[in-house]
Image (cartoon, rainbow, N blue to C red):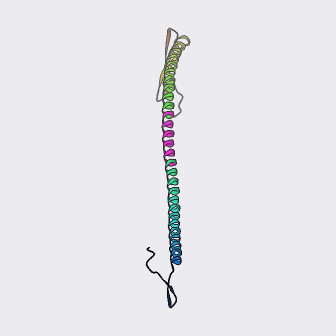
Amino acid sequence: MSLSVPCFLLQGPKVRLMTMGEQKAAVFIQAWWRGTLVRRTLLHMALRVWIIQCWWKQKLVKLQEKRRRTSLEFYARQEWAAVKLQSWFRMWCIRLRYCRLLHAVRIIQVYWRWHSCHTRGFIQGHYDLKENQLNLQLEISLGSQACGVQQCIPLPIKE
Protein backbone atom coordinates (compact mmCIF):
# COMPACT_ATOMS: atom_id res chain seq x y z
CA MET A 1 0.00 0.00 0.00
CA SER A 2 1.30 3.40 -0.81
CA LEU A 3 1.76 5.79 2.10
CA SER A 4 0.66 8.84 0.16
CA VAL A 5 -2.90 7.57 -0.26
CA PRO A 6 -5.07 8.90 2.52
CA CYS A 7 -6.76 6.29 4.72
CA PHE A 8 -9.97 6.88 6.50
CA LEU A 9 -10.76 5.57 9.92
CA LEU A 10 -14.43 5.10 10.63
CA GLN A 11 -15.47 5.79 14.18
CA GLY A 12 -19.18 5.87 14.49
CA PRO A 13 -20.72 8.85 12.64
CA LYS A 14 -17.32 10.64 12.41
CA VAL A 15 -14.78 9.91 9.70
CA ARG A 16 -11.19 10.76 10.51
CA LEU A 17 -7.98 10.67 8.52
CA MET A 18 -5.26 8.31 9.75
CA THR A 19 -1.81 9.59 10.41
CA MET A 20 1.27 8.02 8.95
CA GLY A 21 2.16 6.30 12.24
CA GLU A 22 -1.32 4.91 12.60
CA GLN A 23 -1.28 3.76 9.02
CA LYS A 24 2.04 1.93 9.56
CA ALA A 25 0.68 0.38 12.72
CA ALA A 26 -2.48 -0.73 10.91
CA VAL A 27 -0.44 -2.25 8.09
CA PHE A 28 1.76 -4.00 10.68
CA ILE A 29 -1.28 -5.40 12.53
CA GLN A 30 -2.87 -6.51 9.27
CA ALA A 31 0.38 -8.24 8.21
CA TRP A 32 0.67 -9.89 11.62
CA TRP A 33 -2.96 -11.03 11.48
CA ARG A 34 -2.63 -12.39 7.93
CA GLY A 35 0.60 -14.18 8.93
CA THR A 36 -1.21 -15.65 11.94
CA LEU A 37 -4.04 -16.84 9.68
CA VAL A 38 -1.56 -18.36 7.21
CA ARG A 39 0.40 -20.05 10.02
CA ARG A 40 -2.84 -21.37 11.56
CA THR A 41 -3.97 -22.66 8.14
CA LEU A 42 -0.58 -24.28 7.58
CA LEU A 43 -0.71 -25.82 11.06
CA HIS A 44 -4.20 -27.24 10.40
CA MET A 45 -3.06 -28.55 7.03
CA ALA A 46 0.03 -30.13 8.63
CA LEU A 47 -2.16 -31.77 11.31
CA ARG A 48 -4.53 -33.12 8.64
CA VAL A 49 -1.59 -34.40 6.61
CA TRP A 50 -0.18 -36.05 9.75
CA ILE A 51 -3.57 -37.69 10.49
CA ILE A 52 -3.80 -39.00 6.91
CA GLN A 53 -0.21 -40.30 7.09
CA CYS A 54 -0.91 -42.09 10.39
CA TRP A 55 -4.05 -43.66 8.92
CA TRP A 56 -2.17 -44.74 5.79
CA LYS A 57 0.68 -46.23 7.87
CA GLN A 58 -1.89 -48.23 9.87
CA LYS A 59 -3.45 -49.48 6.63
CA LEU A 60 -0.02 -50.48 5.32
CA VAL A 61 0.79 -52.32 8.56
CA LYS A 62 -2.53 -54.20 8.36
CA LEU A 63 -1.94 -54.99 4.69
CA GLN A 64 1.58 -56.27 5.43
CA GLU A 65 0.25 -58.34 8.34
CA LYS A 66 -2.44 -59.82 6.09
CA ARG A 67 0.15 -60.65 3.41
CA ARG A 68 2.46 -62.17 6.03
CA ARG A 69 -0.36 -64.27 7.47
CA THR A 70 -1.44 -65.40 3.98
CA SER A 71 2.08 -66.42 3.04
CA LEU A 72 2.50 -68.18 6.41
CA GLU A 73 -0.77 -70.10 5.89
CA PHE A 74 0.32 -71.03 2.36
CA TYR A 75 3.68 -72.25 3.69
CA ALA A 76 1.95 -74.22 6.46
CA ARG A 77 -0.39 -75.84 3.88
CA GLN A 78 2.58 -76.79 1.72
CA GLU A 79 4.42 -78.25 4.71
CA TRP A 80 1.31 -80.17 5.78
CA ALA A 81 0.88 -81.51 2.23
CA ALA A 82 4.52 -82.60 2.12
CA VAL A 83 4.25 -84.33 5.51
CA LYS A 84 0.99 -86.01 4.46
CA LEU A 85 2.53 -87.22 1.20
CA GLN A 86 5.58 -88.56 3.05
CA SER A 87 3.40 -90.38 5.57
CA TRP A 88 1.30 -91.91 2.76
CA PHE A 89 4.45 -93.07 1.00
CA ARG A 90 5.83 -94.59 4.24
CA MET A 91 2.45 -96.28 4.86
CA TRP A 92 2.45 -97.65 1.30
CA CYS A 93 6.00 -99.02 1.73
CA ILE A 94 5.13 -100.61 5.07
CA ARG A 95 1.90 -102.06 3.66
CA LEU A 96 3.80 -103.48 0.68
CA ARG A 97 6.31 -105.08 3.05
CA TYR A 98 3.46 -106.42 5.21
CA CYS A 99 1.72 -107.93 2.15
CA ARG A 100 4.98 -109.60 1.09
CA LEU A 101 5.45 -111.03 4.59
CA LEU A 102 1.82 -112.17 4.67
CA HIS A 103 2.28 -113.90 1.32
CA ALA A 104 5.43 -115.61 2.64
CA VAL A 105 3.56 -116.70 5.77
CA ARG A 106 0.77 -118.19 3.68
CA ILE A 107 3.25 -120.11 1.55
CA ILE A 108 4.95 -121.45 4.70
CA GLN A 109 1.53 -122.38 6.17
CA VAL A 110 0.51 -124.25 3.00
CA TYR A 111 3.74 -126.27 2.98
CA TRP A 112 3.51 -126.90 6.71
CA ARG A 113 -0.11 -128.08 6.47
CA TRP A 114 0.76 -130.31 3.51
CA HIS A 115 3.69 -131.75 5.47
CA SER A 116 1.66 -132.26 8.64
CA CYS A 117 -1.15 -133.95 6.67
CA HIS A 118 1.27 -136.32 4.99
CA THR A 119 3.08 -137.21 8.21
CA ARG A 120 0.07 -137.42 10.53
CA GLY A 121 -2.69 -138.35 8.17
CA PHE A 122 -6.15 -137.07 7.57
CA ILE A 123 -9.71 -138.26 7.11
CA GLN A 124 -11.78 -137.29 4.13
CA GLY A 125 -15.24 -138.49 3.16
CA HIS A 126 -18.87 -137.88 2.48
CA TYR A 127 -22.24 -139.41 3.39
CA ASP A 128 -25.71 -139.93 1.90
CA LEU A 129 -28.88 -140.26 3.93
CA LYS A 130 -31.54 -142.30 2.14
CA GLU A 131 -34.83 -143.34 3.67
CA ASN A 132 -33.77 -145.36 6.70
CA GLN A 133 -30.08 -145.96 6.01
CA LEU A 134 -26.84 -143.97 6.06
CA ASN A 135 -24.27 -144.54 3.30
CA LEU A 136 -20.85 -143.53 4.53
CA GLN A 137 -17.65 -143.35 2.49
CA LEU A 138 -14.39 -142.45 4.26
CA GLU A 139 -10.84 -142.24 3.04
CA ILE A 140 -8.19 -142.30 5.71
CA SER A 141 -4.68 -141.29 4.73
CA LEU A 142 -1.61 -141.91 6.88
CA GLY A 143 1.56 -140.73 5.23
CA SER A 144 1.90 -142.59 1.93
CA GLN A 145 -0.71 -145.25 2.89
CA ALA A 146 -4.40 -144.74 2.17
CA CYS A 147 -7.37 -146.74 3.33
CA GLY A 148 -10.92 -146.47 2.07
CA VAL A 149 -14.02 -147.45 4.06
CA GLN A 150 -17.49 -147.75 2.64
CA GLN A 151 -20.35 -148.78 4.87
CA CYS A 152 -24.12 -148.79 4.80
CA ILE A 153 -25.64 -148.34 8.25
CA PRO A 154 -29.36 -149.02 8.79
CA LEU A 155 -31.12 -146.40 10.93
CA PRO A 156 -33.72 -147.54 13.46
CA ILE A 157 -36.63 -145.28 12.49
CA LYS A 158 -40.04 -146.18 13.83
CA GLU A 159 -42.97 -145.60 11.56
Residue 21: x and y in percent read 53, 76
Q: Position of residue 87 (x, y in %)?
A: 51, 31
Give the residue at x 49% y 55%.
56
Q: Residue furthest bottom?
A: 13
Q: Nearer the viewer, residue 87 or 39?
A: 39
Can residue 64 be seen here? The reply is yes
| Up/down of 99 relative to 50, above or below | above
| Quarter occupied by the N terminus | bottom left
Q: Main secondary structure of the magenta part?
A: helix
Q: Nearer the viewer, residue 146 or 4?
A: 4
Instruction: Answer whether residue 70 is magenta in the image.
Output: yes
Image point 54% across, 28% down: which residue? Answer: 156
Q: Is residue 145 above or below residue 54?
A: above
The question of residue 17 being in magenta is answered with no
Camera sees residue 136: no
In this view, the residue in front, 137 or 99, is 99
Q: Which residues are magenta?
A: 65-83
Q: Is residue 70 above or below residue 97?
A: below
Farthest top residue in view: 144
The spot of residue 118 in percent (x, y) is 52, 12
Please state which of residues 127 and 82 is positioned toward the viewer in this rendering: 82
How many numbered marks, from 0 up? Answer: 0
Q: Position of residue 109 (x, y in %)?
A: 52, 18
